[in-house]
Image (cartoon, grey):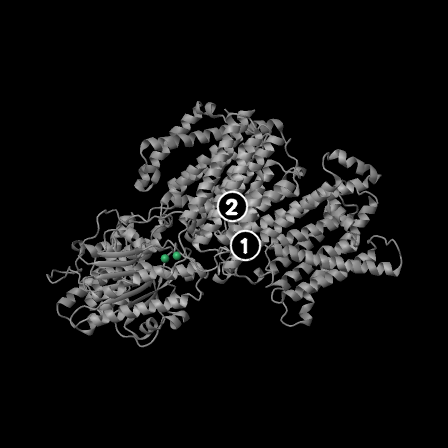
């Protein structure tokens, strides 16, 4: 079966995508959960351990606190309370921490430090898996056993004010609630006023037991202007005032004989030095935890706060409220909080916590008896029983309390061991799915590599021996072998594998695809070997490589190798900037060679006059002066590109190490530089119009101009830029009308473009019509980018168009780079522009605000599409430009260029993806697997998906061509 | 052929002298400056190396008489040649500085470090060109375009220049690593890379010419 290289490439990418999906399914396991679908009940609680028989052992759990107020301040960093900022701006809290009856700790949040997983961690005590980040966009109802469910089950009345993530997670748990949306990051006063306005009336009432307040303003300030902004101070003062209000109200309500109240101040995650969060740097994971209650002993001065895990909050709160600990909790209670209770109660709490952990351990580990904590627990439980026996016998001596303290220490050790054993479980992977996925993508890569000579030949067609291998004996043998392996693995591994849980039809289909691929691959390799033996070493010629080829090869391979190092992944943008700089210099050298050597040759000739006469005849229509200006333009193009890249590089600092350095985007986004930002974005929009309009039809030109105007007025409506005639402040709206206005023009342009494309394919075989249609589709995509980009990023778009135009005009065509070289350059530029835009290999830099452009409320599918589009717009724009460029080349000089381009594009994407998947599998116990390698894996998978879409577009364009000829 | 081998021997000794001058320049400041180390007081090392390489290069090429024969023997011509050479050298320093900034060196903060590296690179590459070819841009373009070498010295220039540039290029790679080593500070790894590249170039140039002596057919001027 002979298929064209573009079809072959898209086919390969589609199989690769399914392989990656399978790998991801195995790599991101569902977080450990106990298999009981029901929730823990009070009646299930174990009794106090006891040796001998005594009816006095208690099974009930008494609450320690009457009312609990939880003040959760989003992105509250540890030093905002305990550090210099806290001393300055939170005097009341600081005083409570130092002298009041309180306990303060630094609670360590786990990566990903994003709000929803952190709320889950606080309320369920489990450590949510990485995949929860992806779900952060549309949080579904929390079905796991959690604190709020337990509280509601025993009739506690809960009131909630704050971030509406809680309301989505716990839809029916609150007696009263008012959610504020974290939709508009630029608003940091209204979100908090919405919470505080209920406070006075609620504190006066006495019909509630738990009050949860989640303040978002600080987080929004962080995203806007970072942790050192001047807005932070007033916000912290406001929070301090709120704490004072709540604390005084709680203490005034306490009466003799009633239980004390508890006030909890905590943060869900911290804030990095740039004000974002999501990663695992120290300022992001260290959050303060302050528990204030009259039950605690008054402190006599500041001691450094101890360190606890964020999940430890759950068992502490649950036991303090007299609730059973949630099943999936992996935290251990914070013992200083219970210091004021009797020794018997303390032991009881420890026992309950460790019993719950043991249950979870039994449920999630097959050989739990071997765990260290298991034995320690049984030992502690036994001595606990002995202690109770002595206690009930009325023994009150010093010996008893010493013994009790010893048991307590044993429990603490057991808890620590159990907790760490359970946390380690999180790194358990579904190896079977991972290996199958990995082998699948490896096969794809092999197929791509084996087909290289054929795919890059003049015909651009690949021979796939599909029928012959499907009808051969080895295929059936392989099929049987794979089936038996599958059965073997599944019977031995139990139900933990994703593949084994599939029903048998998809499983058989997967096995068939797998073995067919293997068979095709084998026969391709066999044919290659045979032909290689026939032709011998004909193809080996080392001198065929130019400096450019060497650079392209070294760059591609070097980038792939660098993926093995976590710091190179964090700083991958540096690699790409470095590469395209070198690329530009090499191109410059090529251009110099071309023009200066020509001149040298002509001056080497015997008579300068003769050459002067020759030249016009050689390069027919261009006049001598034309050549001169053309030469200088060609010479200046790489330099212009270099200058653009240097400017863009200082626009957005990204990565980790130099993230804190000042960059232009921060400067532009400051309030006092709004005029400069407006000017810059207007100029960029003009430039964009200038570069895009040249190949469009008149209608599209007008639509484009109106669309770009719409983009500007959208930004003005949202409040990012100023209208020149409206310098005064105006109401900030969502700008829905303006954005939808632009969407209409985008759809119009895309429609005209695809209409032209269809006409060129079906009715007339007009290549001009086709290239116009392609360009119109491209300009529609550019307009969408312009709408979604933040205003300070518009220069990125303008520069990319500038580079594309000049490069296409003076470099790629003039120097006759072939399709493969052009494709690699496009790919590199696409990568560099991905980072110029401010992206990095860290989830925190994804600009979610792009997903809300023109939407009234959150809609999952458009939001995800728009966010992905704006994130990958750099690679996408360059890929689309490649299609336009290659299909114009296809019509003029190289009939196979689109096929070649598509194949190269697929190969360029497959090599890093496949190598990275193997690397990640090898490094799966690396320290940075969750903070560095996993986000990169998600980025790679998403990038491959985008590439697949582009390749299918390529194939469609190539089909046009095949249809014509 | 015998002539070529003689020339190669000359080149080996010349290169050996230049290489040893780098080592001496690395060691000498120990006796004059206190608390001197290559990494700690990097700029001292850098200027000492580039100065000594410059002096040694000029002396050697002057003694060997490889420089293009002057067209006129007047003093004013010689002076203008020297002045033009100096201008070329300064221009090349600025050129390297601009390239380094384009590669991402900070514009203002570490301008001195960047410029020092540019000086080092110029003295490894441009200065040798000036010595061998004179301040003649046409000749430079000829030498650095493909198959433009006309003597073994041209080939040696090509090789050492390429090695220096590649060495600097490779030297930039460890900078993003988060090892926090003292040699990762800008521009230490790059200047060390340049020096090692230059030394490698000095070593392999005669060897390469000797190895390819059959293929090398230099056009006579
Ligand atoms: Zn948050
Ligand atoms: Zn946030």
Q: What mark, if any, has residue A422 been given in the picture?
A: none
- When asked about the image quadrant of residue A624, the answer is top right
Place of residue A350 in the rendered image (x, y in percent of width and height, measured from the top left)? 24, 62
Q: Are marks 2 and 1 on the same chain?
A: yes
Tell me: B5 left or right of A18: right
Crowding at label 2, few (<14), some or many (≥20) Cα neighbours within 10 Å?
many
Is the CB–ligand 2 distance for label 1 below 8 Å? no
Image coordinates for residue B134, horizontal then vertical, percent: 80, 54
Identify residue for label 1: A680
Q: Residues within 10 Å of mark 1 (few under 14, many from 20)?
A: some
| In the image, residue A511 above or below residue B157 | above
Residue bearing mark 2: A874
Q: Residue at x 72, y 41 (%)?
A: A627
Q: Nearer the viewer, residue A539 or A371?
A: A539
Q: Earlier in the sequence, mark 2 or mark 1?
A: 1
Observer-nearest of A380 and A784? A784
Seen as rendered, the residue at the extreme bottom is A300
How many discs mark residues in the rendered view? Answer: 2
> Dot 1 lies on which element?
helix
Residue B22: x and y, percent? 70, 61
Position of B46 with respect to B216 (left or right) is left
């Amino acid at each position: 079966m002979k298929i064209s290289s573009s079809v072959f490439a898209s086919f390969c990418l589609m199989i690769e995508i399914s392989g990656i999906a399978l790998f991801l399914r195995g790599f991101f396991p569902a977080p450990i959960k106990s298999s009981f679908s029901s929730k823990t009940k009070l009646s299930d609680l174990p009794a106090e351990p006891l040796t001998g028989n005594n009816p006095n052992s208690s099974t009930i759990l008494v609450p320690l606190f009457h009312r609990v107020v939880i003040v959760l301040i989003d992105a509250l960093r540890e030093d905002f309370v305990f550090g210099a900022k806290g001393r300055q701006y939170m005097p009341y809290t600081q005083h409570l921490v130092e002298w009041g009856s309180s306990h303060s700790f630094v609670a360590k949040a786990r990566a990903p430090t994003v709000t929803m997983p952190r709320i889950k961690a606080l309320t369920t005590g489990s450590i949510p898996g990485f995949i929860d980040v992806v779900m952060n966009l549309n949080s579904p109802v929390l079905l796991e056993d959690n604190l709020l469910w337990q509280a509601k089950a025993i009739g506690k009345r809960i009131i909630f004010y704050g971030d509406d993530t809680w309301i989505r997670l716990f839809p029916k748990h609150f007696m009263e609630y008012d959610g504020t949306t974290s939709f508009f990051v630029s608003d940091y006063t209204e979100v908090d006023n919405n919470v505080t306005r209920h406070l006075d009336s609620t504190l006066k009432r006495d019909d509630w037991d738990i009050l949860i307040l989640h303040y978002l303003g600080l987080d929004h300030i962080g995203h806007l202007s970072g942790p050192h902004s001047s807005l932070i101070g007033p916000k912290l003062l406001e929070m301090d005032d709120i704490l004072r209000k709540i604390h005084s109200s709680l203490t005034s309500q306490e009466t003799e004989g009633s239980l004390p109240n508890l006030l909890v101040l905590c943060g869900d995650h911290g804030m990095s030095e740039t004000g974002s969060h999501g990663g695992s740097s120290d300022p992001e994971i260290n959050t303060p935890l302050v528990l204030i209650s009259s039950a605690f002993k008054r402190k006599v001065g500041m001691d450094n706060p101890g360190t606890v895990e964020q999940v430890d909050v759950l068992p502490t709160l649950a036991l303090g409220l007299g609730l059973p600990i949630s099943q999936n909790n992996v935290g251990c209670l914070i013992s200083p909080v219970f210091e004021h209770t009797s020794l018997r109660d303390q032991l009881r709490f420890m026992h309950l916590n460790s019993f719950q952990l043991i249950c979870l351990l039994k449920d999630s580990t097959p050989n739990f008896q071997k765990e260290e904590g298991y034995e320690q627990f049984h030992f502690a439980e036994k001595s606990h029983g002995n202690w109770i026996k002595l206690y009930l016998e009325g023994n009150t001596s010093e010996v008893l309390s010493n013994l009790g303290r010893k048991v307590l220490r044993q429990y603490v050790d057991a808890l620590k061991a159990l907790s760490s054993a359970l946390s380690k479980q999180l790194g358990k992977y579904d190896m079977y799915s991972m290996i199958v996925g990995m082998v699948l993508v490896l096969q794809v890569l092999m197929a791509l590599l084996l087909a290289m000579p054929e795919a890059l030949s003049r015909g651009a067609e690949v021979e796939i021996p599909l029928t012959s291998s499907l009808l051969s004996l080895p295929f059936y043998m392989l099929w049987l072998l794979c089936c038996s392996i599958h059965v073997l693995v599944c019977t031995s591994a139990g139900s933990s594998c994703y593949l084994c849980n599939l029903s048998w039809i998809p499983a058989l289909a997967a096995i068939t695809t797998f073995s067919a691929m293997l068979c095709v691959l084998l026969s391709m390799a066999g044919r290659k070997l045979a032909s290689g033996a026939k032709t011998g070493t004909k193809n080996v010629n080392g001198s065929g490589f130019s400096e450019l080829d060497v650079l392209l090869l070294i760059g591609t391979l070097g980038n792939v190798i660098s993926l093995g190092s976590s710091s190179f992944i964090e700083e991958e943008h540096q690699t790409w900037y470095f590469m395209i700089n070198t690329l530009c210099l090499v191109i410059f050298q090529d251009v110099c060679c071309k023009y200066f050597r020509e001149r040298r040759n002509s001056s080497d000739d015997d008579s300068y006059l003769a050459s002067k006469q020759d030249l016009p005849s050689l390069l027919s229509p261009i006049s001598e002066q034309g050549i001169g200006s053309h030469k200088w333009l060609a010479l200046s193009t790489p330099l212009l590109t270099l200058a653009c890249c240097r400017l863009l590089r200082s626009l957005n600092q990204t990565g980790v190490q130099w993230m804190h350095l000042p960059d232009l985007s921060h400067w532009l986004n400051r309030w006092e530089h709004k005029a400069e930002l407006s000017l810059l974005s207007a100029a960029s929009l003009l430039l964009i119009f200038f570069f895009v309009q040249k190949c469009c039809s008149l209608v599209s030109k007008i639509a484009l101009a109106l669309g770009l105007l719409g983009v500007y007025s959208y930004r003005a409506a949202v409040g990012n830029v100023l209208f020149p005639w409206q310098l005064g402040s105006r109401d900030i709206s969502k700008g829905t009308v303006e954005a939808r206005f632009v969407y209409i023009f985008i759809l119009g342009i895309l429609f005209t473009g695809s209409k032209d494309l269809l006409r060129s394919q079906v009715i007339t075989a007009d290549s001009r019509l086709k290239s116009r249609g392609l360009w119109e589709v491209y300009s529609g995509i550019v307009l969408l980018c312009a709408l979604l980009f933040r205003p300070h990023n518009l220069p990125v778009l303008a520069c990319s168009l500038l580079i594309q135009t000049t490069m296409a005009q003076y470099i790629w065509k003039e120097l006759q780079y072939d399709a493969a070289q052009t494709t690699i350059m496009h790919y590199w530029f696409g990568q560099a522009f991905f980072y110029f835009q401010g992206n990095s290999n860290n989830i925190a830099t994804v600009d979610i605000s792009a997903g809300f452009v023109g939407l009234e409320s959150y809609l999952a599918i458009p939001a995800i599409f728009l966010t992905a589009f704006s994130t990958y717009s750099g690679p996408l724009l360059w890929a689309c430009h490649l299609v336009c460029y290659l299909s114009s080349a296809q019509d003029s000089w190289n009939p196979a260029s689109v096929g070649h381009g598509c194949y190269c594009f697929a190969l360029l994407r497959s090599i890093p993806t496949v190598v990275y998947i193997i690397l990640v599998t090898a490094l799966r116990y690396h320290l940075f697997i969750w903070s560095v390698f996993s986000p990169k894996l998600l980025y790679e998978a998403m990038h491959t998906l985008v590439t697949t879409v582009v390749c299918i577009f390529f194939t469609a364009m190539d089909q046009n061509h095949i249809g014509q000829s | 052929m015998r002539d070529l081998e003689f020339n190669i021997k000359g080149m080996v000794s010349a290169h050996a002298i230049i290489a040893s001058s780098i080592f001496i320049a690395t060691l000498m400041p120990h006796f004059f400056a206190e608390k001197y180390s290559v990494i700690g007081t990097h700029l001292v090392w850098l200027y000492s190396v580039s100065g000594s390489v410059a002096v040694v290069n000029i002396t050697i090429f002057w003694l060997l008489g490889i420089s293009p024969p002057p067209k006129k023997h007047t003093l004013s011509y010689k002076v203008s040649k020297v002045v033009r050479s100096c201008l070329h050298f300064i221009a090349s320093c600025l050129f390297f500085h601009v390239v380094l900034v384009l590669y991402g060196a900070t514009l203002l903060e570490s301008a001195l470090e960047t410029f020092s590296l540019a000086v080092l690179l110029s003295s490894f590459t441009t200065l040798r060109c000036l010595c061998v070819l004179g301040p003649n841009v046409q000749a430079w373009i000829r030498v650095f375009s493909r198959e433009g070498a006309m003597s073994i010295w041209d080939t040696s220039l090509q090789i050492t220049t390429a090695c220096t540039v590649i060495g600097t290029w490779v030297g930039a790679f460890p900078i993003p690593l988060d090892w926090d080593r003292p040699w990762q500070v800008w521009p230490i790894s790059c200047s060390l890379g340049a020096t090692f590249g230059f030394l490698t170039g000095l070593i392999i140039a005669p060897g390469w010419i000797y190895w390819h002596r059959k293929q090398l057919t230099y056009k006579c001027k």
